[in-house]
Amino acid sequence: MKVTAVAHPIQGLVKYHGLKKPKQRIPYHDSISVCIRALTTATTVEASELLKENKIIINEKEPTGKDKERVEIVLDKLKKLANFSGNFKVISENSLKIGKGLGFSASGFAALGLAASKALDLNLHMVSLSEIVRLGAGSSTRSLAGRFAIWYSNKDGRSYAEQLNAPEDMNFSMVIVPIHSDVKTDEAHAEVLSSPLFKTRLRTVDGLLEAMKEAIKQGDVATIGRLAEEDTLNLHAITMTGKSHMVLWEPDTIRIVKEVVHMREEGILAWYSIDTGPSVFINTYTENAEAIAKRLREIGLKNVIISGVGGKPFLTSSHLF
């Protein structure tokens, strides 16, 4: 059977950093994100008893090494549940091919898990599917949940994500600037314990999570933006003070951060947010988004995207093969 699923990547608002159990991709603490409506991953999966091996193409390339292994871990888990002895053809395409730190691994594995489970005619509870896609990319749990979501590191012995209560008509938009980088995010996650700041994060993150949940529930855009900006600085301080002293920001990252601060000083309410990479999200009120995008283009940033909040992954008949 052939099935195509489409999922939205995520912006981390309270970001996860580091994996307590790397093989199971279980983090040290909970995290919260928002799906990006303007960006998508589409993935077509065909399950066939006739295929002698998996055929996997992501953005027109065959994955190798750990990238291929992560895909096959998810597929093998679903195969076992379905008692399926064949293999898969998988074609996956991101709507945007540039930029690091935009959450496309999240949408990629959310779309893969949904499409593959349906191709095998599995009717899994979303918690169970969340735990499976997590084995490919932790943040895919939140892409699977849609909109604003929390990923639990341990809730009654399970690690999965669920959608948070948020007003449907929240006056919230993101302005996104993709920036290229070759850094693998797993490298940053692997060395969090070497930062002297990480233990402080573990002591304080629960308060931040509760504040963010309440801000999302109330539709408080200013508090969401402010807390995500504070969390950005916390996360990158840990990354920069780990054993490799990884600086993930590029010159354009700094330019955007400074421009956002300048805009705020001028009365344009906007807050920057940066995941594990150099790309920048600017969280703001919807009526400010066009003016912010225009300002960024005026300082030479050509690829600027405006987005609202994306929903859960969905199935489509528009197959990629």
Image (cartoon, grey):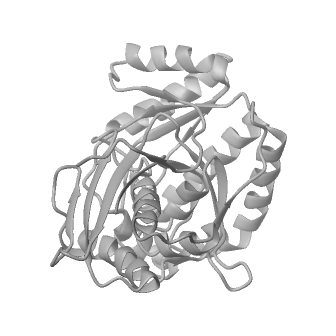
Nearest to the observer: residue 239 or residue 288: 288
215 over 142 or under it: above or below: above
Task: Out of 320 and 97, give the one closest to the viewer.
Answer: 320
Residue 173 image point, x, y percent: 61, 30
What residue is drawn where x is 35% and y is 81%? 76
Q: Residue at image x 44%, y 65%?
A: 113
Q: Which of 107 and 251 is in front in this view?
A: 107
Left or right of residue 62: residue 282: right
Q: Which residue is drawn at 59% across and 75% down?
A: 128
Is residue 242 visible from the viewing direction of this image?
A: no
Residue 172 horizontal/vertical position (percent): 67, 31
Please give the name of the residue rendered at 48% of the width and 83% of the height, measured from the top-left corner: 24
Residue 280 placement (x, y as % from top left): 46, 39
Residue 151: give x, y in percent of width and height: 63, 65
Q: Can residue 16 be seen in this view?
A: yes
Q: In which quarter of the image is the N terminus?
A: bottom left
